[in-house]
Amino acid sequence: MKNLKQIIGTSLLSTFAFFNVQAQVKDHNLNVMNQLATPSHVSVMPVSQLLNAPGNEALRAFFFNPVKDKTVLKGKKIAVLAADGFEEIELTGPVWYFRELGAQVDIIAPKFNPAPARYGLSTPEMAKTHIMAIQYLQPVGWIKFDKTADQIKVSDYDAVFIPGGAWNPDNLRYDKDVIKFIQDFNKSGKLIAAICHAPVVLASADILKGRKLTGYWNIQSDLKNAGGIVSDQPVVVDANIITSRHPIDVADFSKAVESWLAKK
């Protein structure tokens, strides 16, 4: 009996020691995780807040004053090249306006290419048919795309429009189908419009040498390095390229695209 009690006692001590070690491991892992992660306090740029911000009265009026002539761009076809991480208002704003003017607008995305498993990313099923919008680096929603970049031809469209967003241009500039399409579109002389960070996609397509343009403030040096002649203006038009700097320029940018296409 004594031996049995000793065996049970030893077993309990071993079990306690095992769970104590496991608890210490969990505490250590939790401590490491807490140091790797950061609190989820982020800056956002809700559309309503942007439109109501002081100084943006003209931008607000652009969206809320009804479009008078809804046939200005009737018969025109516009391709919107976009990927995950596009700045919401920079896509939805011009797309809404061009459609109000009667244009056909297709949203074109790169072919779905999930990240390797070792990246540890969780991708929703809808990523195969939708792209993710952001508001100043914060994911906010998804929009369905119509085609992928490998499915379109230059002859299909009268203009190409690229919204900004810090992630979107990086995703686009790495896609060979997107770059080839932009290069061919530029050779055709048709309109290429890009706002905010999007002009870096044009830099990757190597079509900026000697061209006048603008872009988001922190990419202007990249545009200069690509051979562009950069100025800090709301909109710059140089032949078949129209560029803008920021979401606050969406109205001026959209009107410049309208004016260019309406003359053709």
Image (tube, rainbow, N blue to C red):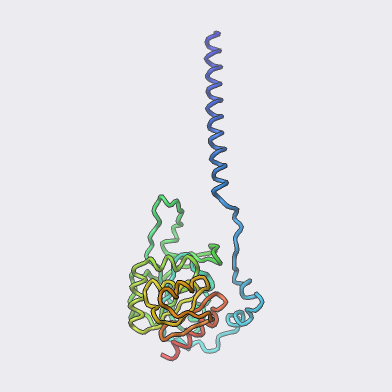
Compared with residue 13, is residue 25 higher up or lower down, i.e. above or below? below
Residue 127, position in %: x, y? Answer: 44, 61
Please state the horizontal and vertical placement of residue 259, each as a whole percent of the image: 48, 88
- Which residue appears at 44% of the width and 58% of the height? 125
Please tell me which residue lies in front, 230 or 161: 230
Q: Which residue is situated farthest in the right direction here?
A: 54
Residue in the image at 41% along x and 78% along y: 160
Compared with 174, 96 (above or below) is: below
Q: Exactly how many numbered labels are in the figure? A: 0
Residue 240 lies in quadrant: bottom left
Q: Position of residue 252 (x, y in %)?
A: 54, 83
Q: Does residue 182 appear left or right of residue 2 in this picture?
A: left
Residue that sits furthest to the bottom in the current view: 263
Q: Nearer the viewer, residue 42 or 76?
A: 42
Going by the picture, which residue comes out furthest to the top? 1
In which quadrant of the rendered image does the C terminus lie? bottom left
Q: Position of residue 130 (x, y in %)?
A: 45, 65
27 to 83, vertically: above or below: above
Name the residue rendered at 37%, 66% in the picture. Answer: 175
Q: Residue at x 52, y 76 (%)?
A: 245
Write down the quadrant of residue 31 in the picture: top right
Q: Nearer the viewer, residue 52 or 172?
A: 172
Q: Is residue 239 above or below residue 83?
A: below
- Quarter of the rendering occupied by the N terminus: top right
